[in-house]
Amino acid sequence: MELLAYFKSILDMDRAPVVVCDLEHTIIYMNPVAVKRYHGDLTGKSLMACHNQKSCEMIEKVIKWFEASPENNITYTFRNDKENKDVYMVALRDDSDKLIGYYEKHEYRDHETMPLYDGIL
């Protein structure tokens, strides 16, 4: 099986929304949770069309920061108290450390309510 299928499956099984963009801010992938959260598949559309001017400016600043050094790979973008989560922008790089895109990472801070090994034991 091709490695790409494994990576896609990891993203598809994530409980948080994942939206992957290229450097032109075109959405190239949304996992099923993101499609549901954002009310449809926005693949092929510009991420910038989904944000206000201030957010677009910040996204551009983050991209420049990512490009400045291969060490610059993740930045905290905001806290959503209502959903108890922190949100980050993460650089995507090829094998030579060249920036090829980015994605938004959601980290929920709620304690897990599912029993250990739920449904298995």
Image (spheres, rainbow, N blue to C red):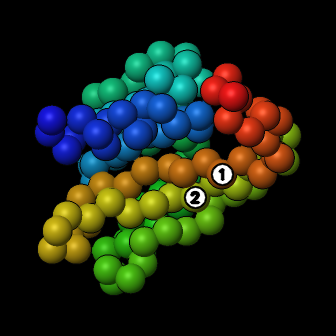
| Disc marking residue 47 | none
Task: Residue 87 in the image: state x and y as whole percent.
Answer: 64, 54
Give the residue displayed 54% in from the left and 51% down from the top.
105
Give the residue displayed 31% in from the left and 43% down from the top.
7
Give the residue displayed 67% in from the left and 35% down from the top.
117
Asked if 15 appears above or below 20 in the picture, the reply is above
Placement of the C terminus among the 4 image quadrants: top right
Which is more toward the observer, 94 or 27?
A: 94
- Is the C-beta separation of discs 2 and 1 under 8 Å? yes
Task: Residue 47 in the image: state x and y as whole percent.
Answer: 42, 39
| Residue tagged 2 | 88
* Quadrant of residue 83 within the rendered picture: top right
Q: Secondary structure at mark 2?
A: strand
Task: Tell me: 118 left or right of 91.
Answer: right
Q: Secondary structure at mark 1?
A: strand
Placement of the N terminus among the 4 image quadrants: top left
Q: Nearer the viewer, mark 2 or mark 1?
A: 1
| Disc marking residue 107 | 1
Amino acid type assigned to the residue bearing label 1 in the image? Glu
The residue most toward the front is: 121
Task: Residue 18 in the image: state x and y as whole percent.
Answer: 48, 39
Between the C-alphas of marks 2 and 1, the distance is 8 Å
Task: Tell me: 25 left or right of 73.
Answer: left
Task: Residue 17 in the image: state x and y as whole percent.
Answer: 54, 36
Which is more toward the observer, 110 or 3?
A: 3
Asked if 62 appears above or below 56 in the picture, the reply is below
Which is more toward the observer, 25 or 2?
A: 2
Asked if 49 appears above or below 54 in the picture, the reply is above
